[in-house]
Structure formats: C-alpha cells, structure tokens
Image: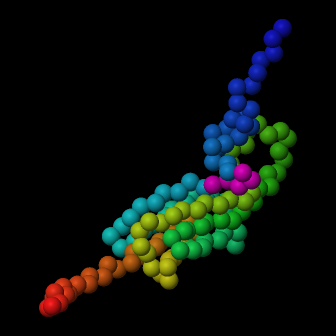
Amino acid sequence: MSRGKRKDPFGELYGEFRDRLRGDRWQPDVDVFETEKSIVVCAELSGVRSDDLRVTVDGQDLRISGVRLVPEPSGVHRLHQMEIATGPFERRLRISIAFERDGVNAHLADGFLTVTLPKRARVSVKVELEAPEDE
C-alpha cells in the first residue's frame, strides 16, 4: 500500500494566505498611488485597533507595523479553516518620490489605513553661465 503524500502542507494549513507570511510576521496588502499633490499608501488592516498600530518614516522608508489580536470566538467546537492572519505584522515601503516628511498624515477607518505623503514642491533654479576667463 502506498501512502498519499500531502502536496503542500503549508497550503493546507494556511490556505491562500501563506504567501503573505514573512518569518514570524505577516504583511498586510497595500495599494500605492500618486495624486497631483501627494503619494498615498492604503493598507488593508481590518480588525487592527489604532492603539496597536505604528506608522513611522525614516528617510525614504515608510514602515507600518503593529499587531492584530485574535478575536475570541465563543462556542467554537472545532476549527475548520483559518486564513485571517493574526499576531505581529510589518510592511516597509521605499518611497522613491521626494515628499515632505513633516506633512505625513495617517488615518485608520473602516479597516483601511491611509497614509498621505505630500510631494515636495519642485524648485526651479536659474543657473548663470560663467564668462570664460581672459588670459
């Protein structure tokens, strides 16, 4: 008799979610887009409380980190499937467009964190040509 092998034990345990695990942390999905005046990062963080969330900017790096606590289900007899990640998370993004670090704004509502990074204003500088030196 041959024993059947599991094709992907992590896939069976974590479902489609396994590709978002990075070590001992999970990574929230993000959308990054640009408007005329800012760069906007939107992270999907349903179930995360604002007290359990940190947003930091270091140079060009935006770091979103925190923890999503396990909801306490009542009356669970047997678990059949578990795909919603809980525990610590972190997402680091390098923002390649110059932005004003002092004007960064973050807002958590309806399960989405929106971080707005205002673009740095372009400065035009007129460069004067130097006259050749007479010998």
Residue 84 placement (x, y as % from top left): 68, 48
Q: Residue at x 74, y 57 (%)?
A: 87
Lateral position of residue 40 relative to residue 63, left or right: left
- Magenta span: predominant SS is loop
Lateral position of residue 91 relative to residue 129, left or right: right
Would you place residue 3 above or below residue 91 in this image?
A: above
Query: Colour scheme used in the picture?
Result: rainbow
Would you place residue 131 above or below residue 82 in this image?
A: below
Residue farthest to the top?
A: 1
Q: Residue at x 36, y 73 (%)?
A: 37
Would you place residue 30 above or below residue 37 in this image?
A: above
Choose top left, top right, bottom left or bottom right for residue 83: top right
Front one among 34 and 77 = 34
Front one among 80 and 116 = 116
Residue 107 placement (x, y as % from top left): 54, 72
Would you place residue 3 above or below residue 132 in this image?
A: above
Front one among 60 and 14 = 60
Asked if the magenta segment contains residue 90, the reply would be no
Residue farthest to the front?
A: 135
Q: Residue at x 47, y 66 (%)?
A: 95
- Which region is colored magenta? 23-27
Front one among 99 and 83 = 99
Q: Quadrant of the C terminus?
A: bottom left
**In this orientation, does residue 20 appear?**
yes
